[in-house]
Amino acid sequence: MRAERHLDWPGCFNVRDLGGLPAAGGRETRHGAVVRADSLERLHEDGWAALLAHGVRTVIDLRNEGECGEDHAARPDRIATIRIPMNPDRHRRFVPVAERGPEFRTPLFYRAHLQRFPELSASVLLAIARAEPGGVAFHCVAGRDRSGLAAMLLLALAGVAPAAIAADYGLSRERLGPLFAAAGLEDEGPAIDAFLAERGTSAGEVILTTLASLDVEGQLRAGGLTDEDLAALRERLLVPAAAR
C-alpha cells in the first residue's frame, strides 16, 4: 500500500484515497477519485480545507440519523452532502442479530447485508457514479464497517484483486487506535481480533472468502444498478488505459 493513500485531514483519523491500486487489464485506480473516511463531522476547519484541496466535492454519509451530530467546524458550501443510511434498521429481523455480538464490527455481516438489502449498497455506488465532477468521499462512524463494505464492492467492480481489497480493509485496524484514544474509549481492535480468532479466521480471510463466494456485480444489479451505472463507476474510479 502506498503511503500517500493515507490522508491527514485534521479531526479525522481513518481517511485514505482508494487510488493507486492495481486493477484488471493492467489498469489502476485513480488517485483523487474516491476517498473512504471515518465521520467527517469531526473535521476541523483546516480539515475541511484539506478535503477541498484534495478535490472532494461530494460527501456520502452512510450513518443512520441517530448517529449524526453537529459538524465540529462549518461545512463548506461547495460540498454536496448525500445521506444514504446503510444500517437497515427498518428490518428488525436482521439488525438485532448484528447488534447482539461483535460480528457487526467485522466483515462477517457483509454477505447477509448484500444478499438481503442489495438496494442499500447499490444506492451508495449509484451516488458515487452520478456525483458531480470532483472527488467523492464516503464515511460512516469509524470508517471501517459500512465504509468497508462500500469500498469492498467498489474495488471489486473495478477489478482490484481480493488480496488488495482485504489489505485495504486491514489498514483501518492500525488507524482506529488513535481515534478511540481521542474519544476516551478502549480500542475495539484486540477484542475484534480475538472474536475472529476464536472462529478460526481473520478480517482479511473473511473478505477473501466473501468475495470468492459472491457474485458482486449480480447482487448490485439486483439492487438496481444498470450497465450504464457500472460503466460510470469504472470510468470514475479507473485511470484511462491510454493514460498508463
Image (spheres, grey):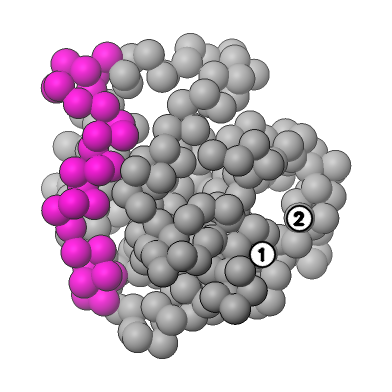
Q: Is residue 212 magenta?
A: yes
* Residue toward you, 63 or 176: 176
Q: Is residue 27 above or below residue 149?
A: below
Q: Which mark is residue 54?
A: 2
* Residue toward you, 159 or 12: 159
- Locate residue 186 relative to residue 156 in the image: left or right: right
Q: Which residue is mark 1?
A: 135
* Secondary structure type for disc 1: strand
Q: Residues within 10 Å of mark 1 (few under 14, many from 20)?
A: many
Q: Is residue 94 above or below residue 55?
A: above
Q: Residue at x 39, y 47 (%)?
A: 165
Quarter-wise, where is residue 108 in the image?
top left
Quarter-wise, where is residue 124 in the image?
bottom left
* Residue toward you, 242 or 146: 242
Q: Residue at x 26, y 76 (%)?
A: 221
> Where does the N terminus fall, quadrant-wise?
top right
Please state the horizontal and vertical placement of residue 63, each as a whole percent of the image: 48, 49
* Secondary structure type for disc 2: loop
Q: Which mark is residue 26?
A: none
Q: Mark 1 vs mark 2: which is more N-terminal?
A: 2
Q: Which residues are magenta?
A: 194-222
- Locate residue 118 relative to residue 239 in the image: left or right: left
Query: Is any part of residue 87 visible from this angle?
Result: no
Q: Which residue type carries mark 2?
A: His
Q: Which residue type carries mark 1?
A: Gly
Please state the horizontal and vertical placement of residue 15, each as a whole percent of the image: 61, 41
Query: Is any part of residue 226 visible from this angle?
Result: yes
Q: Is residue 65 above or below residue 170?
A: below
